[in-house]
Image: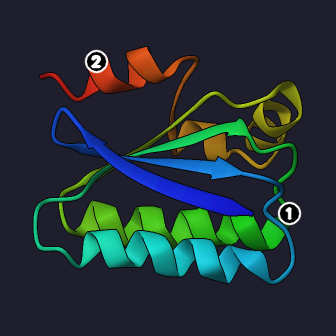
Amino acid sequence: MKIKGTTKNGGQIIKIEGPIKAGNEFELGQKIEEYISKGDVPKFIIDLKKVPFINSAGLGMFLNIYKHIDGLKGRMVFTNLNSDIENLMEITKLASIFEIYKTLEEALESFEY
């Protein structure tokens, strides 16, 4: 799994490449926590365009990070989910918790309030 972070419009775009599965979800969690600890109110776009699969531990990690960011009055949104991950978010009811956008542009626009 590869993780790349860039900043745009005051938000941190985290692009992930590869499956999020047993063992590597911790690396992803640590990387996002590094960005959170930089001090500003955290605003994250999690781009899953190149993620074919997320296991239950990965979903749990995203939920824990979401709760942490929410407690800091920040935001974490998702974009570019494939149909399998989108279905997984629906089945697990996480789609009602997470903000999900079809495109990166839509996600970026959501931060312009």
Instruction: Residue under label 1, please give it.
Output: 55
Residue 102 in picture, x, y percent from top left: 58, 17
Question: Which quadrant of the figure has residue 93?
Answer: top right
Q: Residue at x 65, y 82 (%)?
A: 26
Residue 36 in the image: state x and y as whole percent.
28, 71
Looking at the picture, tell me which residue is in the foreground, 77 or 52.
52
* Residue located beneath label 2 in the image: 109
Q: Nearer the viewer, residue 76 or 13?
A: 13
Residue at point 16% right, 22% down?
112
Query: Residue at 41% of width from left, 67% of height from top?
Result: 67
Q: Residues within 10 Å of mark 2 (few under 14, many from 20)?
A: few
Residue 19: quarter of image: bottom right
Q: Is residue 15 above or below residue 102?
A: below
Q: In the image, is 21 to the left or to the right of 44?
A: right
Three-letter amino acid code of the residue under disc 1:
Asn
Quadrant in which the C terminus appears: top left
Position above or below: 84 against 35: above
**CA gap, disc 2 and disc 1:** 29 Å
Asked if 24 appears above or below 83 in the picture, the reply is below
Count residues near mark 1 (Cα–Cα under 10 Å), then give few for <14, some for 14-19, many for 20+: some
Q: Could you tell me which quadrant the N terminus lies in?
A: bottom right
Q: Dot 1 lies on which element?
A: loop
Kindly identify the amino acid type of the residue bearing the numbered disc 2.
Answer: Glu
Question: In the drawing, does residue 29 fall left or right of residue 9?
Answer: right
Q: Position of residue 25 (x, y in %)?
A: 70, 74
Q: Which element carries disc 2, helix, strand or loop? A: helix
Q: Earlier in the sequence, mark 2 or mark 1?
A: 1
- Residue drawn at 16 percent across, 41 percent down: 10
